[in-house]
Image (cartoon, rainbow, N blue to C red):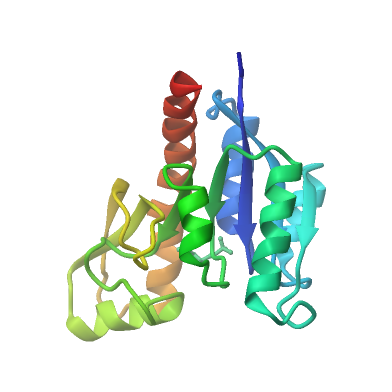
Amino acid sequence: MLNKIRVAVLCSGGGTNLQAILDAQTAGKIASGEVALVVSDNAGAYALERAKGAGVATAVFDRREVRDRTQREQAILGALRQHKIGLVVLAGFMTILSEAFTREYEGRMINIHPSLIPSFCGPGFYGLKVHEAALARGVKVTGATVHYVNEVCDGGPIILQKAVAVEEGDTPETLQKRVMRQAEWQILPQAVELVCKALLKKA
Ligand code: GRF
């Protein structure tokens, strides 16, 4: 009988969402899972420093070294299997994953997106571009979504969402920071616990 789901977090950048998960784990808010591996396709990602600081194993398959996407994906899959990963968390991971990859982890892979899906999502909507689009449309409320990953970009079943007010004078940068602070860093750790708990019940 498993007592915790082994979690891998895939990051390409600063890793503030990874940090939120690690902090929630330290605070005892993730009882059903444990971060066992951090994977990055960017050797310079600060997320890797955060992992090392927390004593978490890392695996790096840099986009500039492993240029072939299929080869890179096979290497990532190998690391996930080697570490007996039960839940994959995409937290600002820039490599687009193939249908075969998402099928292997269907129901066991989640993603954080910085808008209230179905708004401002899908191909081309990532990072600051999401907030630029929200400001351009003039929405008064935006937020973040955690969803299961399937073969449709940002199209899997929604797990959690949290709304955030757009404020007068917001720039894409100020809005991004507020959405991260008030929504992403709250709902992603919550979703990790929810999904790990459900997976444990099925194990
Ligand atoms: C976050 O804004 C997340 O919504 C998006 O990529 C960004 C990752 O930021 N998918 P960080 O690396 O977690 O700081």
Q: Position of residue 92 (x, y in %)?
A: 54, 65
Q: Going by the image, does 203 lie left or right of 2?
A: left
Nearer to us in this view, 116 or 164: 116
In front of the other: 80 or 137: 80
Q: Nearer the viewer, residue 75 or 29?
A: 75
Q: Position of residue 48 (x, y in %)?
A: 75, 59
Vertical position of residue 68 compared to residue 163: above or below = below
Where residue 57 appears, as percent x and y from the top left, is 80, 46
Residue extending farthest top: 1
Q: Is residue 63 left or right of residue 163?
A: right
**Residue 3 horizontal side relative to residue 122, left or right:** right
Q: Residue furthest front?
A: 100
Left or right for 52, reference 112 = right
**The N terminus, quarter of image:** top right
Residue 174 screen position, x and y as percent? 42, 73
Compare residues 184 and 182 and report the one nearer the observer. 184
Taking the spot 35% from the left edge, 64% from the top edge, the residue there is: 154
Residue 66 appears anywhere in the view: yes
Q: Residue at x 76, y 77 (%)?
A: 66
